[in-house]
Image: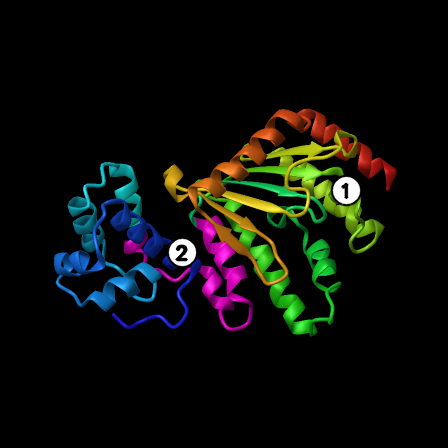
Amino acid sequence: MTPRAMPTERQKRLGAELRKMRIAAGAPAEYAARLLGVDRTKISNFESGVRATAPDRVRTLACHFACPDEKYVAALENMAKERHRGWWEDFRGTLPPGLLDIAELEWHAVGVRTFQVTHLPGLLQTEEYARSIFEAVLPPMPRLNVELHVAHRMQRQQVLEGERSLTYLGYIHEAALRMQFGGRKVALDQLNYLLAMSERANVTLRVLPVGTGAFPGAGHAMLYADGPVPQLDTVQLDSAGGPLFLYAESQLARYGDHLDWMERTALDPTQSRDFIHAVTNDL
């Protein structure tokens, strides 16, 4: 198969899992190459995501590396089978690759949990609210770029609808509810949209009031994507250089603890809806 110039985050993740499996078995790359009947350099390419890995090769490696978790191996095989072109590929070359990786992560997730401090959740933003955010960057983006970002953000929201109906839990700090991006009317429409979406069976919103005080992870927003098996969970953080994707066991545990803290502390869904109603009345 033709090498990839820029593998996606999901392609790199599959390679990283194959490498983790090999190292756990104490097997050198040369041994893996002999198992698959390929040159050693191709093992490096498989494990970096530069080259695609066939599902039968994933199974061969798992068998010889004595990986006991059948669900995990099957999930890796399914990742290797993927050859379809996701809707986010329509934006490749016009938007930063990291944004496409976020859309792909959400598309394949079993469930998503987020925490927002300043902006409201991207999966629940109205078009005008999203536009106001992208218009506020410095230096200003050209109008076409703004509209491309908005269109991409709106298309991400399809994971909450139809057959997919992703299970979504959003923790929102009160500060994000009170930020009036786009002005009073845009903010009011956005809050009313949040309330409408919170009535859906697959969407849960929980508010963290400012009176709660200090909280873990206060410096950044977070997305925790549940994979088909826990080993394939992923944390995504925003940064000035673009999105960061974390999946080391210690990192997943750390941000899992953050979400457990939110679960214990945030207002329950009914209280949260009442709180959002109160904020709309203040506008």
Q: Residues within 10 Å of mark 1 (few under 14, many from 20)?
A: some
Q: Which mark is residue 38?
A: none
Residue 98 is a magenta residue: yes
**Where does residue 111 sit, x and y in percent of width and height?**
48, 39
Residue 175's tag is 1
Q: Is residue 83 visible?
A: no
Q: Position of residue 107 (x, y in %)?
A: 46, 50
Q: Which residue is mark 2?
A: 10
Mark 2 packing: few (<14 Cα in 10 Å), some, or many (20+)?
A: some
Q: Amino acid at mark 2?
A: Arg
Q: Quadrant of residue 217?
A: top right
Mark 2 falls on what kind of element?
helix
Residue bounds of the magenta highlight:
79-107
Nearer the observer, 31 or 50: 31
**Mark 1, secondary structure of its residue:** helix
Query: Do the residues bearing badges 1 and 2 touch, measured as CB atoms within 8 Å?
Result: no
Name above or below for residue 235 compared with residue 149: above
Q: Chief secondary structure of the magenta span?
A: helix
User: What is the three-letter code of the residue carrying label 1?
Assistant: Ala
Residue at 67% x, 29% y is 266
**Image position of 107 with respect to 258: above or below:** below
Q: Reading the chain from its start, which is encountered first: label 1 or label 2? A: 2
Compared across the picture, whether 79 is left or right of 136 comes to left
Q: What x and y, as percent, mark residue 200?
A: 58, 35
Marker count (numbered): 2
Q: Residue at x 50, y 73 (%)?
A: 93
Residue 30, visible in the rendered structure: yes
For residue 94: magenta?
yes
Q: In which quadrant will I find the C terminus?
A: top right
Q: Nearer the viewer, residue 157 or 9?
A: 9
Distance, label 1 to label 2, CA atoms, is: 33 Å
